[in-house]
Amino acid sequence: MLLRELREIVRSTADATFATDQSGVVVAWNAAAEMLFGLPASQALGSFCGAILHGTDECGSVCSARCNIRQAVQSHQQLGNFDLQVQTAQGRKWCNISVLAAEVNGSAFPYSIHILRQVDTGKRLELLVRDFVVTETQLPAEEAQPMAAATRSPLREVELTRRETEILQLLSRGLTTEKIAGQLHISRTTVNNHVQHILQKLNAHSRLEAIRRAERAGLIRG
């Protein structure tokens, strides 16, 4: 596909739609996106998409230089739609986002087409009902956890290795680096290396934040 063809697809889409290159830079921005974000194409083009969206979900900040969605597109993963709270012209709103990968001539990695549909009222109601059920029913932890999981979070696209999932699960149980190393029969250095990879993939700044985000996204059980 030629870049001009990609831009034509974006321009002709009725929903708010934009496209980014492999670095997350906006290369196409349609009229519906201008209305949703209150930002003309002349200002959006060339900007990092995260700096426009300021996206968050139930787990916290999502948009960053280590965008989970961009990593998934570059790995040619099939992506499900997800909910993201973004900064619009009317304040922060929940949108359901579909991402399509597009092969563009001359690029080593696919471009990403983002299609946004506002779901703010429904999403807020969903969160209120979920939190009420989890709090008031006093369900056992193994039954409450699936309800609390952010099942439409971009984090669900994160691909943790079997070992990373194992270490993250042990961290959630309060095990130290030394105890994890002993239980898995690996060195403490190896454990710390895995932890650093986990933090990067989950866009987390601490082990506790990584555990929280993984539990809320349903990557591990609490």
Image: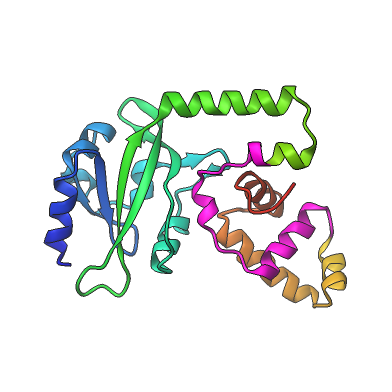
The image position of residue 105, as x and y in percent, is 19, 72
Residue at image point 79% right, 59% down? 170
Q: Nearer the viewer, residue 11 or 77?
A: 77
Residue 64 drawn in magenta = no
Whether residue 209 appears in this view of the structure is yes
Image coords of residue 7 (percent x, y) = 16, 55
Q: Position of residue 102 (x, y in %)?
A: 27, 63
Tell me if 221 is positioned left or right of 175 in this view: left
What is the tally of numbered marks visible in this picture?
0
Residue at (62% x, 59% y) in the render: 199
Question: Could you tell whether 133 is left or right of 39 in the image?
Answer: right
- In this view of the protein, which residue sits in the foreground, 114 or 206? 114
Quadrant of the image occupied by residue 185:
bottom right
Q: Is residue 128 above or below residue 155?
A: above
The answer to whether residue 117 is above or below residue 166 is above
Quadrant for the N terminus in the image: bottom left
Span of residues in magenta: 146-175
Q: Quadrant of residue 176 in the image?
A: bottom right
**Above or below for 135 versus 193:** above
Residue 67 visible at all: no
Colouring style: rainbow
Q: Main secondary structure of the magenta part?
A: helix
Going 28% across and 51% down the picture, which residue do you hit?
47
Q: Position of residue 84 (x, y in %)?
A: 44, 40
Q: Quadrant of residue 30?
A: top left
Q: Is residue 5 left or right of residue 205?
A: left
Rendered residue at 14%/66% (across/down): 2
